[in-house]
Amino acid sequence: MNAKPRALVIDDEVQLRRLLRLALTGIGYEVFEAENGSLGLSEAAFRHPDVILLDLGLPDMDGAEVCRRIRAESNAPIIVLSARASEAEKVRALDLGADDYVTKPFGPDELLARIRVALRRVTAEEVPESGHLQAGDLVIDYDRRRVTLSGEELRLTPKELELLSLLARNHDRVLTHRAILKAIWGPNAVDQPEHLWALVAQLRKKIEPDPSAPRYLVSEPWVGYRFVS
C-alpha cells in the first residue's frame, strides 16, 4: 500500500492551518504543522514532506530565509502563502527557490490546483539535456535543437531557443525576470528587463496560436514567466 503524500504547513495563523489541514486531509494528505520558521525547518528535515506551504510573515524569522534553507536540502515544491502587498517579497522568495506563490486571502480550490501543478513538475520525468518535451502541439527536440508546432518547424533565433529551453526545463514553475535575465544574458543584465520583454514578444509570435492570449508562455504579472506544459 502506498503511503499518503505529506504536506507541511508553516504558518503562524492557527485558523489558516486548521483550514489547510481540513482541505488537504480531505484529498488524502498527511498534514504536519509548524507555527514558526525554526520549527518549520526541523519538521521539513524530519518529515520529508512532498509539498511545503510557507508563509512569508513568520514570527521568529523571515519566511524567505526559511525557503532558502529548505531549498538547500530538499527538492520538494515550496508554495509561498503571502499577505504582503510587495511584489519584491514574492520575487525574492521565488529567486530563493520557491516554486509558486498564492496571495492571501485565497480559496482552497485555487491552492489545491497550485499544489497539483507543483507536484506535476517534480513527479514528471526530468527533461534531460537530450530528448524532447511535448506540450500540446509544441515539440522541443533538444538533440537537434529543433522546435516544431503542429508538425511545422519553427525558425527560432539562438536567444529565442535558449529562452524557450530554459522555461520548458522548468515547466509549470514561475521563473522570475531576474533569474531569466541572469541565465540568458549574465549577471550584468538583471536590471535590464526590456531585453526580456522584447524576446518574449518575439517568441510568442512564433510559438503561440494567439500571442495576445498565450497558451504556453504565460506571464506572472510583475514577477516573471511560466511555461505551461
Image (spheres, rainbow, N blue to C red):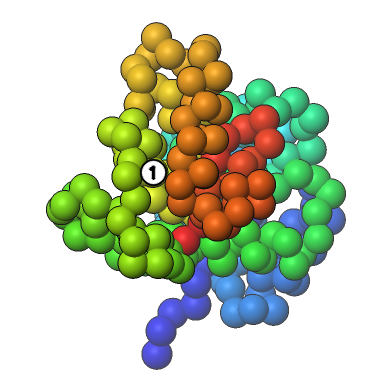
Q: From what the image shows, is residue 61 above or below residue 146?
A: above
Q: From what the image shows, is residue 53 above or below residue 85?
A: below
Residue sitting at x 84%, y 49%: 105
Q: From what the image shows, is residue 129 above or below residue 65?
A: below
31 or 196, nearer to the observer = 196
165 or 121, nearer to the observer = 165
| Image spot of residue 46 (x, y percent) | 43, 54
The N terminus: image quadrant: bottom left
192 or 25, nearer to the observer = 192
Disc 1 marks which amino acid? Leu
| Image spot of residue 213 (x, y percent) | 66, 52
Quarter-of-image position of residue 23:
bottom right
Q: Secondary structure at mark 1?
A: helix
Residue sitting at x 79%, y 38%: 83
Q: Is residue 41 visible?
A: no
Direction from residue 158 to residue 202 in the image, left or right: right
How many marks the image carries: the answer is 1
Residue sitting at x 19%, y 60%: 131
Residue sitting at x 33%, y 67%: 151
| Image spot of residue 184 (x, y percent) | 35, 26
Q: Residues within 10 Å of mark 1 (few under 14, many from 20)?
A: many
Quarter-of-image position of residue 123:
bottom left
Direction from residue 2 to residue 84 in the image, left or right: right
Direction from residue 152 to residue 26 in the image, left or right: right
Which residue in the structure is indicated by mark 1?
Answer: 164
Question: Please, which residue is most extreme toward the top here?
Answer: 188
Question: Please, which residue is most extreme toward the bottom here?
Answer: 1
Q: Is residue 184 visible?
A: yes
Direction from residue 171 to residue 26 in the image, left or right: right
